[in-house]
Image (spheres, grey):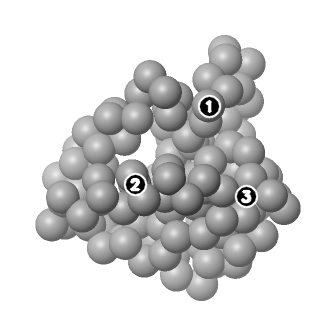
Amino acid sequence: MKVLIADDSVLILERLRQMLCLNSQVELVGSYHNGNETLEALKVLKPDIAIVDIKMPGLTGLEVLKEIRKENSSLKFIILTFHATGYHREMALNSGADYFFSKVDDFEKVSQVITELTMI
């Protein structure tokens, strides 16, 4: 499975890289720091899974999600955030996100979901 990650935090990107390296079924195809680069990379690289921060410079994760859904409905999209309110969850899921996780409380769930998706 090809996975793309995007977050404006270097620390979060590194944690995601470390997590993904533990799964031999995952190929990390790119990591990005802003929404504009992320959207372009999604169009070119066509990953199976995108793990994207909800709030980034340029386009937000939700704006990236809305744009990419116009072209790719099969991409599994995971939104990460420090702002895990019900409002943000609802916005993400209504925008077409497949998963929504708090970076504080749910970070390890990302690994579980990736493992499940690679087994399909």
* Rendering quarter of residue 43: bottom right
Rendered position, 31 above or below 94? below
User: Along the horizontal axis of the image, is 110 left or right of 81?
Assistant: left
x and y, in percent, of residue 25 in the image: 19, 66
Say which mark, if any, is on residue 16: 2
* Distance CA(mark 3)–CA(mark 2): 19 Å
Residue furthest front as drawn: 11
Q: Amino acid at mark 2?
A: Leu
Residue furthest right as drawn: 58
Residue visible at 66% across and 56% down in the picture: 8
Which residue, given by chain and number where applicable, does mark 3 sit on?
64
Q: State the residue in front, 34 or 119.
A: 34
Asked whether the residues under the numbered discs 3 and 2 touch, taking CB atoms below 8 Å apart as contact, a structural biologist would say no
Asked whether the residues under the numbered discs 3 and 1 touch, taking CB atoms below 8 Å apart as contact, a structural biologist would say no
Within 10 Å of disc 2 (Cα), the crowding (few <14, some 14-19, many 20+) is many
Query: In what quadrant of the picture does the N terminus appear?
Result: bottom left
Residue visible at 50% across and 50% down in the picture: 12
Q: State the residue in front, 20 or 87.
A: 20
Q: Earlier in the sequence, mark 2 or mark 1?
A: 2
